[in-house]
Image (tube, rainbow, N blue to C red):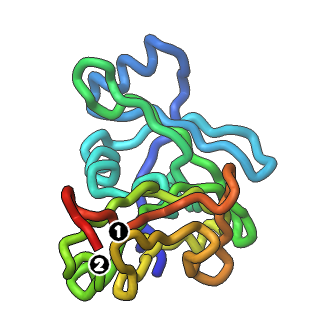
Amino acid sequence: MSRKSYEIVAEMRDRVGKGAARALRLAGRVPAVVYGDKKPPLAISLSFKEADKRLRAGGFLTTVATVVIGEEKIRVIPKDYHLHVVKDTLSHIDFLRISDDTVVTVFVPVHAVNQDKSVGMKRGGALSIVHHEIECQCRADQIPESIDVDVTTLNIGDSVHIEGVKLPEGVKPVIHEKNYTVLSITAPVGFTE
């Protein structure tokens, strides 16, 4: 299941640079840039309150959005954002324009499901998630909200590797190391068979 898309209203920026960006932030706006899809970049600004709400809601970098500038609507996905070093407030966003066939690389969170039914966990084992996120490639409109790994049949000492994870259709893992471990059930201290 992919995340629900949202719309965010933006305004064009007529000035760019540090001074202009500082003035925008003082006025309660966040400077941003929309780039990609073989079109020139657009310098825009967003309401700080609305942009910060979207960031803090989770899944910001894996959720498709529609930036509304006047009558124009542009489908985008946030590619990067910057926070103020001291205040931890949103200070800039980079958006990537997307079309129906745009393929993106994103990090998708891993969720271990059926922990209460896990054979190994019932015996006192502990769930150890080695990779909390899996780097995936997929079409922008097919980004899954999470990758669910069923741990029902895992016993103490068992693990699930990336090649054993069932990914949604159209989603491929970006593998940097061969068949890495995603999660495992570890033995409690002092455990003997």
Give the Cα separation between the discs numbered 1 and 2.
Answer: 6 Å
Residue 57 marker:
none
Q: Which residue is mark 2?
A: 120
Q: Name the secondary structure under disc 1.
A: strand
Residue 174 lies, with reference to residue 111, above or below; the image says above
Q: Note whether residue 133 is visible.
A: yes
Query: Could you tell which of marks 1 and 2 lies nearer the N-terminus?
Result: 2
Residue 185 marker:
1
Q: Name the secondary structure under disc 2.
A: helix
Q: Note whether residue 66 is visible.
A: no
Neighbours of disc 1 within 10 Å: few (<14), some (14-19), many (20+): many
Q: Is residue 94 left or right of residue 53?
A: right
Q: Is residue 46 left or right of residue 14?
A: left
Picture quadrant of residue 175: bottom right
Could you say which is closer to the camera, residue 46 or residue 129? 129
Could you say which is closer to the camera, residue 190 or residue 94? 190
